[in-house]
Image: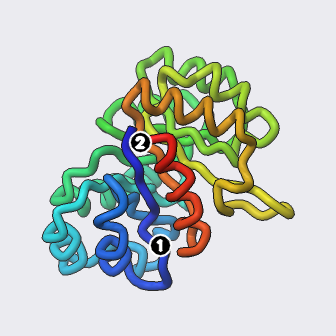
Amino acid sequence: MKISAPSFVIPADRVSNVRYLKNMVDEVELLFFDSRHEFDMPEESEIAALAKLGMAYSAHLPTDTDLNTPDGWRVIDAYLEKLKPLNLKRAVIHPVETSFFLKELAKRLDVIIENTDFHGSFFDEAVGMGFRICFDNAHAGANAYQFHERYAPHIAEYHLQGETGGKHHKSLEHIETNLLESILTHAKRNGATVCLEMFNEDDFLVSYEIIKEYK
């Protein structure tokens, strides 16, 4: 099991976040969401700075593209091309439940599907085709334990977060204990990466201490 964190734990740029996280985690997930704005695409200088830090990276690909169209996939490919110097461990994408999506995904190595809801038949088809999953416990909602038990052998990365007061991305103090233990047991067994998906330092540090006890 490897521990990861997103590239925005402290209120600073990606490079500063990686420097902050470097001695705590095994990987950093570089976050990209808003491809329609130029600031989301990293500059060559940022890529070079990230490469010099000697960190292992994954990426969360933009969520604002229409992946039922060739144009949407051209945006995704532009990010993958720009990030090539970082030798990503994997890239995570939010799926659409169509055969076109799966056909296009099959052309791109090391891109895995994040669950955005509990859609059993789609994920049955995806894992049957050999695709791997990124499991986000909050996205699965009340079906989190069921989804996890069903697809655990196919999960390469976890996005873990607590929920409280209707708010996501809280510390692991706010995740159901049995679910957490099941996730970490499978993560260790399968060599999966566990990303602590919190976007502030306090929640991340609390969660980091919790997960270290399991590692």
Residue 168 percent across, percent down from the top left: 72, 60
Q: Is residue 189 above or below residue 46?
A: above
Q: Amino acid at mark 1?
A: Phe
Q: Amino acid at mark 2?
A: Thr
How far is the residue under mark 1 from the one under mark 2? 18 Å
Crowding near the residue tagged with mark 2, few <14, some 14–19, many ≥20 C-alpha atoms within 10 Å: many
Crowding near the residue tagged with mark 1, few <14, some 14–19, many ≥20 C-alpha atoms within 10 Å: many
> Secondary structure beneath disc 2?
strand
Residue 32 percent across, percent down from the top left: 45, 65
Quadrant location, the N terminus: top left
Residue 73 percent across, percent down from the top left: 41, 49
* Residue under pointer 2: 193
Q: Residue at x 48, y 24 (%)?
A: 154
Q: Is residue 69 visible?
A: no
Q: Residue at x 33, y 54 (%)?
A: 27
Query: Mark 1 near mark 2, Cβ–Cβ under 8 Å?
Result: no
For this rendering, which residue is in front, 171 or 76? 171
